[in-house]
Image (cartoon, rainbow, N blue to C red):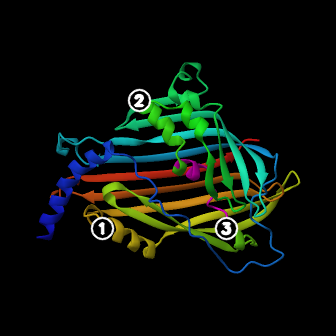
């Protein structure tokens, strides 16, 4: 009976995975970071926070990749005719200046973001459906080209949180339209996307922002993977060292993530446990690195990458045959690099 169930699951996966590749890419499940720090900070420990001063301007490059793939593993003659695999997803690179316009008595800053450059690549089943590069003059006539030079204003905290989008009306008006590319440009200016782009979730919370090498802090991050369900992780950052570069103190912290069982249980209650997730073996890695300039109070480099694979073998394969299997993979990448 169990073998029959797994055979049915393998056959159903062939159809469902083809559908998954045409659906939208999995996104974060919308959980706000829940930060905590251990052990208690000491007064003499360095402050791991942004320094927000009116008039200050910095240029950054953000890269975000959201990819999923389905691959047939086994003899080609055994691959069903209806099965199609490949990669589906998007990669965004945005270069922008961040100018601090003012600060309030709580230490929050109004930061003006001006888009200087943009690359946007989208694929569906290995077919490129959108390839925009603002460095190419021929691409500037695209609705995405109208984003170059546009600005919006956010409220930024010293702990790296975007507490709100103050004003993005002008930029949004510039990309109004009914085409799919217009909608892609507009989505880059949605409140949720702006907050995801500019929040630095690697920093500890405001009341726990001092740490010495060896000390750690953590936050919760959740993702949704369509029919494969939701995953929740506790991201644990540990301050590795504080070094010097050109008379600047640079703090380096490394991140390793572990599954958060408590949060996953809550997500399953909200979404229901997908049938598909119980049929697969999976492996996952989620790691990151932060380099914070303590002298300037700016992020020099920050990268987080999640890779996860699900595998299911065809239980009807004969012992003397190369076994057939399906592999689905997903990647989520977010990186920030200081350009000047």
Q: Mark 1 points at which residue?
A: 273
Residue 191 visible in the snapshot:
yes
Over which residues does the magenta segment extend? 193-204
Left or right: 285 in relation to 214:
left
Q: In percent of the image, x 66 and y 31: which residue is there? A: 149
Q: Which of marks 3 and 2 is nearer the N terminus?
A: 2
Q: Name the residue under label 3.
A: 204
Q: Where is residue 86 in the image (x, y as percent from the top left)?
A: 34, 41
Q: Which of marks 2 and 1 is nearer the N terminus?
A: 2
Q: Does the magenta stretch include residue 203?
A: yes
Q: Which of 288 and 110 is in front in this view?
A: 110
**Front of the two marks 2 and 1:** 2
**Element class at badge 1:** loop
Q: Which of marks 1 and 3 is nearer the N terminus?
A: 3
Q: Position of residue 49 (x, y in %)?
A: 74, 62
Quadrant hosting residue 207? bottom right
Extreme right residue here?
A: 247
CA–CA distance in space, label 3 to label 2: 41 Å
Left or right: 282 in relation to 79:
right
Q: Name the residue under label 2.
A: 179
Q: In percent of the image, x 46 and y 41: which residue is there? A: 90
């Amino acid at each position: 009976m169990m073998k029959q169930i797994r055979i049915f699951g393998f056959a159903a996966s062939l159809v469902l995975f083809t559908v998954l590749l045409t659906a939208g890419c999995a996104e974060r499940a919308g959980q706000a970071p829940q930060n905590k720090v251990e052990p208690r900070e000491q007064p003499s420990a360095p402050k791991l926070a942004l320094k927000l001063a009116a008039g200050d301007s910095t240029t950054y490059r953000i890269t975000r990749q959201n990819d999923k793939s389905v691959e047939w593993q086994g003899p080609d003659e055994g691959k069903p005719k209806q099965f199609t695999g490949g990669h589906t997803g998007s990669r965004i690179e945005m270069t922008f200046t961040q100018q601090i316009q003012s600060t309030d008595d709580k230490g929050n800053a109004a930061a003006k973001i001006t888009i200087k450059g943009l690359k946007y690549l989208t694929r569906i089943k290995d077919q490129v459906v959108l390839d925009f590069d603002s460095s190419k003059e021929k691409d500037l006539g695209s609705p995405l080209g109208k984003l170059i030079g546009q600005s919006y204003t956010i409220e930024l905290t010293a702990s790296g949180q975007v507490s709100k989008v103050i004003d993005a009306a002008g930029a949004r008006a510039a990309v109004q339209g009914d085409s799919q590319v217009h909608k892609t440009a507009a989505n880059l200016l949605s409140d949720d996307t702006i907050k995801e782009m500019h929040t630095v979730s690697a920093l500890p919370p405001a009341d726990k922002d001092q740490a010495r090498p060896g000390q750690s802090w953590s936050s919760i991050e959740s993702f949704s993977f369509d029919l494969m369900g939701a995953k929740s992780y506790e991201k644990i950052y540990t301050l590795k060292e504080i070094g010097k570069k050109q008379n600047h103190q640079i703090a380096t912290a490394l991140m390793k993530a572990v599954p958060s069982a408590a949060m996953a249980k809550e997500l399953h209650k909200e979404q229901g446990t997908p049938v598909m997730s119980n049929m697969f073996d999976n492996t996952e890695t989620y790691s990151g690195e932060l380099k914070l300039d303590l002298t300037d109070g700016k992020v020099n480099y920050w990268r987080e990458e999640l890779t996860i694979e699900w595998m299911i073998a065809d239980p009807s394969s004969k012992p003397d045959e190369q076994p057939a299997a399906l592999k689905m993979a997903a990647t989520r990448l977010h990186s920030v690099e200081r350009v000047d």
